[in-house]
Image (cartoon, rainbow, N blue to C red):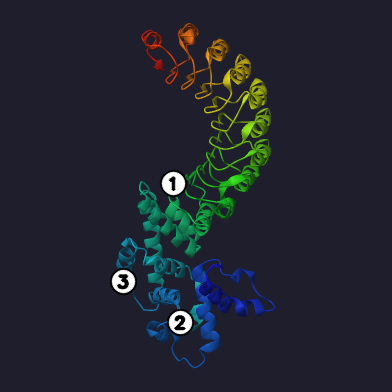
């Protein structure tokens, strides 16, 4: 609100008397826009309404210069008539408009429905009709339920976000839990979210323990928005924050959530968020204490060797629970592979490792291969596509993997492997019973080599060979 001069004026007028009181009640500080405007109208009536015989009648016919005050008074008017049987129709029609003209009005209506929001106004306007309040609450509950299952399109996601604003304005914990009690996933991927939108989401997540998956991929969230989200993030089991411009400062906020003793995050996706080795240090520190995380996606960042080495150090912790780690496209070279290989020798939880798009080349792949040779290694899925790998490194890797009894998927696509590696690959495919898929497309096999590799699918019906 501080960026809007008119809101600042309202804020000063509404809260001026509050801050001049010697014994002020912190519980009365407005938490929502509805409460702020209620205080404004209350202070106006209390301090400047001595000559008004019927404030109710005045509010029903008075025109305010400030448009948002008009919106608030229009919402207030819905509660100033004895019986509004048509209010459900009114709310439904207003919410169905797609140009957003009634968004503020509807938020005020939802906010006023909670007794605490406008309690002071009843001193001048009398009690609000209980039936009208109940109808509004029921409408909000049903509308949130309906919109929560309609998030396939951006329009549906925007409509759901608008209904969550109703919950925020109402500050009604019971209503939020009743409306979202069966909802486990909130998805807003691709929808541009402002810091205020993030604050609303955080409030809703804080009220509802059922939300397990929060999908915020590519929502244009920056550090300020993540600060607003921060208090509720640790409650989600699956947290998707990829393709947002979080930077190191934003990742540090996520790291704080991982350190929370009550953290429930099991899957964390931070793909393409602008993470460097500076932010990786704080993240690695959080990983060393977190005991809930099993899947971490850090691909398409700028950690480099130093950042990957920091994460690798966390993997060496015997209490580490990570099963899936994606580090692809992070400017990793053989220098960083050395620290990673050291971690793989001691880690017993990791089952999936993605190093695609790195610069390991043969030397780096050979370092990783030495760790994979350990019979205690649990790796099931290994991705080494686009790594400048030649026959020299491929043969060492395949030899190491032949001793691994858990490997199910191997990706060596878009490297420089030739027919010289076909015999070794053939032995691997024929002797490793756990292998279900091997990706070899984009290499330098001849037509004869490709045909020989594809033919290995015949004796292994469950094996898929992409070449």
Can you tell which quarter of the image residue 77 is in?
Answer: bottom left
177 or 355: which is nearer to us? 355
Q: Earlier in the sequence, mark 2 or mark 1?
A: 2
Residue, x 55% and y 73% (percent of image)? Answer: 8
Q: Which mark is residue 422?
A: none
Mark 2 neighbour density, 10 Å: few (under 14) some (14–19) many (20 or more)? some
Q: CA distance from mark 3 to mark 2?
A: 20 Å
Mark 3 element type: loop
Q: Position of residue 135 (x, y in %)?
A: 37, 66
Q: Would you say residue 425 is visible in this rendering?
A: no
Residue positioned most to the bottom: 51
| Res. 288 image quadrant | top right
Residue 232 in the image: x percent, y percent? Answer: 56, 50
Res 125 label: 2
User: Residue 17 at what x, y percent from top left?
Assistant: 61, 80
- Residue nearest the observer in this picture, 150 or 153: 153
* Residue 12, horizontal then vertical, whole percent: 58, 76
Element type where label 1 sits in the image = loop
The residue singled out by tag 3 in the image is 85
Which residue has dot 1 on it?
A: 189
Q: Is 170 above or below relative to 38?
A: above
């Amino acid at each position: 609100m501080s960026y809007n001069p008119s809101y600042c004026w309202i804020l000063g007028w509404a809260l001026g008397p509050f801050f001049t009181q010697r014994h002020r009640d912190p519980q009365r500080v407005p938490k929502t826009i509805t409460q702020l405007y209620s205080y404004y109208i209350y202070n106006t009536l209390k301090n400047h309404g001595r000559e008004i015989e019927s404030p109710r009648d005045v509010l029903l016919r008075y025109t305010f210069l400030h448009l948002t005050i008009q919106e608030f008074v229009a919402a207030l008017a819905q509660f100033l008539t004895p019986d509004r049987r048509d209010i459900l129709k009114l709310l439904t029609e207003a919410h169905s408009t797609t140009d957003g003209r009634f968004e503020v009005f509807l938020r005020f209506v939802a906010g006023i429905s909670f007794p605490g929001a406008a309690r002071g106004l009843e001193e001048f306007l009398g009690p609000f009709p209980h039936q009208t309040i109940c109808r509004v609450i029921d409408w909000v509950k049903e509308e949130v339920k309906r919109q929560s299952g309609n998030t396939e399109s951006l329009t549906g996601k925007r409509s759901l976000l608008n209904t969550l604003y109703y919950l925020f304005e109402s500050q009604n914990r019971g209503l939020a839990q009743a409306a979202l009690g069966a909802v486990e996933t909130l998805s807003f991927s691709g929808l541009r979210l402002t810091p205020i939108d993030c604050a609303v989401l955080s409030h809703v997540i804080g009220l509802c323990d059922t939300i397990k998956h929060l999908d915020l991929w590519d929502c244009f969230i920056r550090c300020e928005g993540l600060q607003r989200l921060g208090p509720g993030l640790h409650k989600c089991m699956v947290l998707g924050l990829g393709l947002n411009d979080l930077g190191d400062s934003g990742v540090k906020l996520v790291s704080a959530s991982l350190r929370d003793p009550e953290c429930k995050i099991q899957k964390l996706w931070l793909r393409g968020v602008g993470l460097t080795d500076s932010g990786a240090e704080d993240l690695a520190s959080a990983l060393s204490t977190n005991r809930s995380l099993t899947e971490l996606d850090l691909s398409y960042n700028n950690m480099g060797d130093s950042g990957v080495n920091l994460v690798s150090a966390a993997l060496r912790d015997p209490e580490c629970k990570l099963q899936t780690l994606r580090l692809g496209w992070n400017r990793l070279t053989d220098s960083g592979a050395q620290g990673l290989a050291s971690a793989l020798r001691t880690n017993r939880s990791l089952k999936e490792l993605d190093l695609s798009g790195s610069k390991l080349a043969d030397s780096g792949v050979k370092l990783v291969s030495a760790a994979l040779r350990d019979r205690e290694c649990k790796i099931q899925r290994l991705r080494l596509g686009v790594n400048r790998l030649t026959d020299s490194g491929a043969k060492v890797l395949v030899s190491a993997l032949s001793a691994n009894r858990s490997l199910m998927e191997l990706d060596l696509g878009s490297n420089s492997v030739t027919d010289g590696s076909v015999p070794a690959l053939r032995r691997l495919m024929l002797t490793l019973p756990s292998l279900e898929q091997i990706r070899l497309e984009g290499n330098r096999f001849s037509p004869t080599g490709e045909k020989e590799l594809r033919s290995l699918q015949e004796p292994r019906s469950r094996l898929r060979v992409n070449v």
